Amino acid sequence: MTLEVAPKSLDKLRCDSRVSLSGVRDIRLEKIGANTVEGYVANKSMRALISKFELTESDRPNVIFHVTRLTIPAPVPLGLTLADLAEHRSPAQLRVIKKLVRQRSTQSGRWRGDTRTA
């Protein structure tokens, strides 16, 4: 869902425990989307969040929610954050994806063909 919230409410929404931050707002990343909230929200929490923060649908969103059937705990799996970043396709997000993939490959061994080496 692409939504809009009053700029003064962004920080409160970002801190709401019903939102598991991802993509441009993943807590493990440098802050590349300072004026945006992106994350996963369980379907059962959407109505309350919309009401509390007066969220409205928007073509120029500052809130991106990936609505799920179940609650996804924070921090979300890194693969979800990488996929969310890839959807944005901006140079900044693509640089972060490359950096994260490089960090992961050096931390967990390198891939050679279909075999991982330590």
Image (spheres, rainbow, N blue to C red):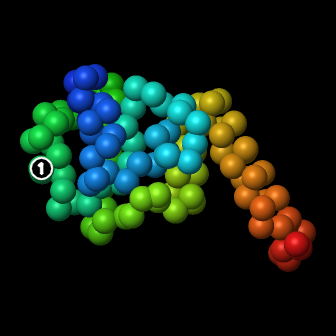
> In which quadrant is the N terminus drawn?
top left
Residue placed most toward the observer, 86 or 73: 73
Horizontal side of residue 91 vs 47, given as left or right: right
> x%, y% of residue 13?
27, 39
Label 1 sits on a secondary structure element that is helix
Local crowd size for mark 1, using a 10 Å CA cut-off: few (<14), some (14–19), many (≥20): few
108 in relation to 100, above or below = below
Side of 34 relative to 67 (left or right): right
Q: Is residue 18 left or right of residue 21?
A: left
Q: Residue at x 52, y 52 (%)?
A: 81
Question: Which residue is at a point 27% across and 67% down the rendered structure image?
Answer: 69
Q: Position of residue 89 (x, y in %)?
A: 58, 36
Residue at image position (16%, 36%) is 53
Q: Position of residue 80 (x, y in %)?
A: 51, 57
Depicted 85 relative to depicted 67: above or below: above
| Whether residue 66 can be seen here | no
Relative to residue 55, is residue 12 drawn left or right? right
- Which quadrant of the figure contains the C terminus? bottom right
Judging by the rendered image, the residue that carries numbered circle 1 is 48
Where residue 50 sits, quadrant-wise, is: top left
**Mark 1 belongs to which amino acid?**
Ala
Q: Is residue 114 visible?
A: yes
* Residue depicted at 82% across the width and 58% down the height: 106
